[in-house]
Amino acid sequence: ILVLDNLGGSLKKSIRNIVGKGRISEKDVKELNKEIQRALLKSDVDVRMVKALTDRIKKRALDEKPPKGASAREHIINIVYDELVNIVGKGTEIPVEEQDIMLVGLQGSGKTTTAAKLAYYFKNKGLKTGVICADTHRPGAYSQLKKLCGEVNCLFYGEQESEDAVSVVKNGLKELNKTEVRIVDTAGRHSLESDLITEMEEIEETVGADRTYLVIDASIGKGVKKQANAFNDAIGIDGVIITKLDGTAKGGGALTAVSETDTKIAFIGSGEKYEEFEEFDPDSFISRLLG
Ligand code: GDP
């Protein structure tokens, strides 16, 4: 498994140290787990998730017999990889079909940028795509999104003077009824104020979104659990998009949102440009978390 073979530093060293044919020794598992914990905590993965993960690794490493012909090292690498994929999730199938998508998240998380990125993504798949600006709170949201849509060359609907996001969405859906993918960018929330939650619920009812993605900044810390649950309770989250993975943050905090909402990571944003966006790939995410 390449991900773990390509690691650097002390984690690799502790994997290298595992020798022999039979079962791995308890001392070696402990040593390895310590390195895994260190790496994951540094990447902001929740401490309880890390503990549960390394407990499972330890149990399996000591209980399970290596398959015939496999060395102790190969065996433990398989277990570690397997358990890591378990917490980060496999990639999700992104359907290339007619759909309404809603983006929610805190202000500054990268929703507006992501709306344009998604539009570009689906446009490249050959679908006629339009974006609706339902952010009537942040001055500048309208022109920012309009400009981005111009660059991506997709349809855009917004009402610069309107303060009624629900009515903008209604009009936008009507206006864009010839498109196949409609992406609704909602107002960023500073925190989860109740009036904004109500507005979000009304927008969700109007859109009847096929998919609602929670957009999360890779550097998100402790607040993630509360946030993810609040969004999920209000409108139901179908997947997570992690932004700004080009920065120093490793995005481990987003795993808490994934586990709290019982969803998966759908896309990764890795830059300000609309093409800096890709479907989630567990292998590269894992090597980043451990690296
Ligand atoms: P919104 O308030 O959630 O709509 O956030 P914006 O889309 O306006 O993004 C906030 C800032 O983050 C902007 O300066 C974006 O250019 C920047 N941004 C968004 N996504 C990324 C990303 O993946 N990488 C980097 N480096 N910057 C990003």
Image: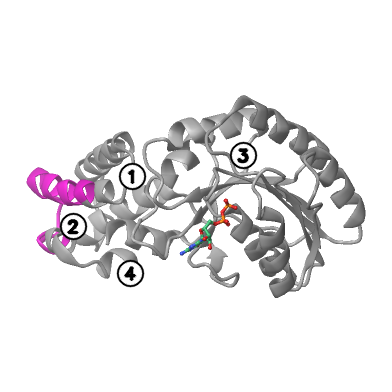
Please name the predominant secondary structure of the magenta segment in the image: helix
Mark linked to residue 2: 4
Q: Which of marks 3 and 2 is in front?
A: 3
Measure the C-alpha gap from mark 3 to mark 2: 40 Å
Specify which label sits upstream in the sequence, 1 or 4.
4
**Tag shown at residue 59:** none
Q: Which of marks 1 and 2 is nearer the N terminus?
A: 1
Question: What residue is disc 2 on?
Answer: 72
Residue at 28% across, 37% down = 47
Is residue 101 a member of the stretch shown in magenta?
A: no
Quadrant position of the N terminus in the picture: bottom left
Name the residue at 61% across, 59% down: 114
Q: Are discs 4 and 2 less than 8 Å apart at CB?
A: no
Residue 203 image offset from top left, x and y in percent:
76, 38
Crowding near the residue tagged with mark 1, few <14, some 14–19, many ≥20 C-alpha atoms within 10 Å = many
Residue type indicated by callout 4 = Leu
First in sequence: mark 3 vs mark 4: 4
Q: Check disc 3 and report the residue beneath it.
A: 237
Alpha carbons under labels 3 and 4: distance apart:
32 Å
Q: How crowded is mark 4: few (under 14 residues within 10 Å), some or many (20 or more)?
A: few
Front tag of 1 and 2: 1
Cα gap from disc 3 to disc 1, whole angstroms: 20 Å
Determine the secondary structure under disc 2. helix
Marks 1 and 4, how far apart at CA? 22 Å
Kind of residue at badge 1 = Val
Looking at the picture, tell me which residue is in the foreground, 75 or 143. Answer: 143
Check disc 3 and give the amino acid type: Ile
